[in-house]
Amino acid sequence: MTSTKYLFSPGDVLYSKLRPYLRKVALVDFRGLCSADMYPIEADHEVLDPTFLKFLLLSDSFSAYANDESRRARMPKLNRQQLLSWETPIPPLPEQERIAAALREQFDAAARMRAAMDTEAGSLRRLATTTLENLLAGLRQAGCGLRRCGDVAAVTGGIQKSPARAPQAFHRPFLTVRNVMRGYLDLSEVEHMEVTPAELDRLRLRAGDLLVVEGNGSRDQIGRNALFRDEIDECVHQNHVIRVRPRRDLLNPDYLSLYLNSRQGMEQMLQRAMTTTGLHTLSVRKIESLEIPVPTLAQQDNAVESWAALVRQLDAASRAAGRGASEVDRLPAAILRAAFSPSLG
């Protein structure tokens, strides 16, 4: 085989020379140019089948060689001479073609299985969305009225970050935009900010507070929100995160979070977030103006429990699908080991 620089033709194999991408290999069926990060390899078709070569470069034996050689290099890559110097037993061309055809069939089958897993995961997500919309539509059809968010909840801004608030004598946990996901809090990294006792008293988060992100570069992330469930003591929040504290005699906090994370809730927030400057941002006043369908507390509780039961079922199905997908993702490596290790290792 020979390696040309950048130009490739149909039947050539493209090989990534940089670590950690040494197992990126492609057989091309068109003419073109590749980046300097790849080697186009032209196989001598009289002695080497291109498809067999592609799979050979993905094998454990070549990957181990490439990793070892690239570690020795001054730069983390496999150079052309190292690539062309690898030696391994090669079977006769008819045997190569047989092995290549079998591998291609097995890889295609694994790809079909992975696509089916992805389709199933997408179906689960759509089912969750449809079920939530149906739950909320049922409540609206039952005749529940709309209330201004500001009339059924206390809406409050947070504390602006600044160098002057670096932790000193009275610092407290401080939730920012990066902590608030859609439907849950990511508390893997929590900042601390200096506050005053008065600020802590006014802005301390309580179980059942809903945290709403005021702005985001992505339209579908505007107003993403999650409930605070008292995971952290004496915690406050950033000014770019708006606190919504529902009146417990009128609103179940979980119901409010469900609604604001639903299509109708997100559409309302996106509509209010639009500005003449093209930016998308919410504010305390805009959140207060949201119209919330407020059924009876018993109806809200039933909706929340129905949703939670479905989520448990979907989570179980999703975990099972994930385990299946992981097994499928391991198939290509297992297929290659079975094909190359016994005879060509």
Image: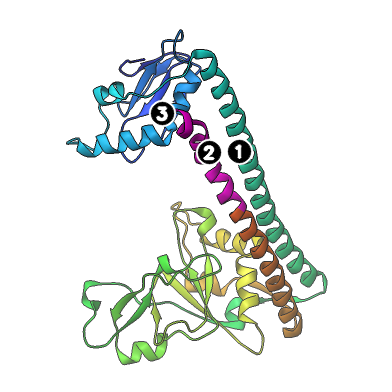
Residue 77 location, x and y as percent? 26, 34
Tell me what residue is drawn at x 60 percent, y 66 percent.
261
Please check the rendered image and state whether residue 333 is part of the magenta-colored stretch, yes or no: yes
Q: Which residues are magenta?
A: 324-345
- Residue at mark 3 to residue at mark 2: CA–CA distance: 13 Å
Residue 149 location, x and y as percent? 60, 77
Q: The residue under label 3 is which amino acid type?
A: Leu
| Side (left or right) of 224 relative to 241 | right
In the image shown, does 162 or 308 lie closer to the viewer? 308
In the image shown, does 299 or 217 lie closer to the viewer? 299
- Please name the residue that numbered disc 1 is placed on: 110
- Residue at mark 3 to residue at mark 1: CA–CA distance: 19 Å
- From this view, report whether residue 131 is shown above or below residue 195: above
Q: Label 2 crowding class (10 Å Cα cut-off): few <14, some 14-19, many 20+? A: some
- Please name the residue that numbered disc 2 is placed on: 332
State yes or no: discs 2 and 1 in contact (Cβ < 8 Å).
Answer: yes
Q: Label 1 crowding class (10 Å Cα cut-off): few <14, some 14-19, many 20+? A: some
Work out whether mark 2 precedes mark 1 in sequence or the reverse, and give the earlier one.
1
